[in-house]
Image (cartoon, rainbow, N blue to C red):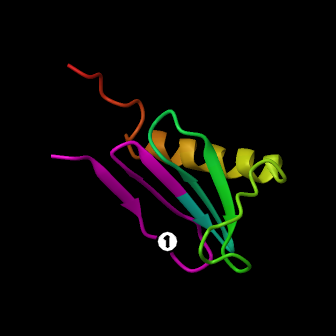
Amino acid sequence: MARRRISRSQSGQARLFEHEGNAAVRDGDFKLVREGRAGAWELYNLAKDRTEQTNLASKMPKKVQALSEKWKTWATTHQVLPYPRKK
């Protein structure tokens, strides 16, 4: 069975998730996503780009760092990390 963890936010808090190595953080207008465990983080401003066509990661590296650290802290706290070893 696939591991799936979702953190449901209360008003004003970030939403974070992981599913089969894919990860995301939704915080305000911003969404940070990663495809696969080794994928690069992509950043989107959903208020201006709801179809996620313009990756802002290279233009906003501090935002990427802050949100990815938030995800890592959440993932460690909720036992998503460390990932289980493949057999």
Question: Quick check: is 10 in the magenta stretch?
Answer: yes
Residue at point 60% right, 40% down?
40
Dot 1: what SS?
loop
Q: Position of residue 18 (x, y in %)?
A: 41, 51
Q: Position of residue 61 (x, y in %)?
A: 80, 46
Circle 1 crowding by C-alpha within 10 Å: few under 14, some 14–19, many from 20 = few
Pick whichever, 62 or 75, lies toward us. Answer: 62
Report the residue marked by disc 1: 9
When the figure is inspected, residue 17 is found, relative to residue 34, above or below; the finding is below
Q: Position of residue 29 (x, y in %)?
A: 69, 74
Pick whichever, 51 or 72, lies toward us. Answer: 51
In the displayed structure image, the side of residue 63 where residue 29 appears, left or right: left
Quarter of the figure with residue 11 = bottom right
Quarter of the figure with residue 48 = bottom right
When the figure is inspected, residue 1 is found, relative to residue 55, above or below; the finding is above
Q: Which residue is the extreme one toward the top?
A: 87
Magenta part of the chain: 1-24
Q: Which residue is the extreme one toward the right?
A: 59
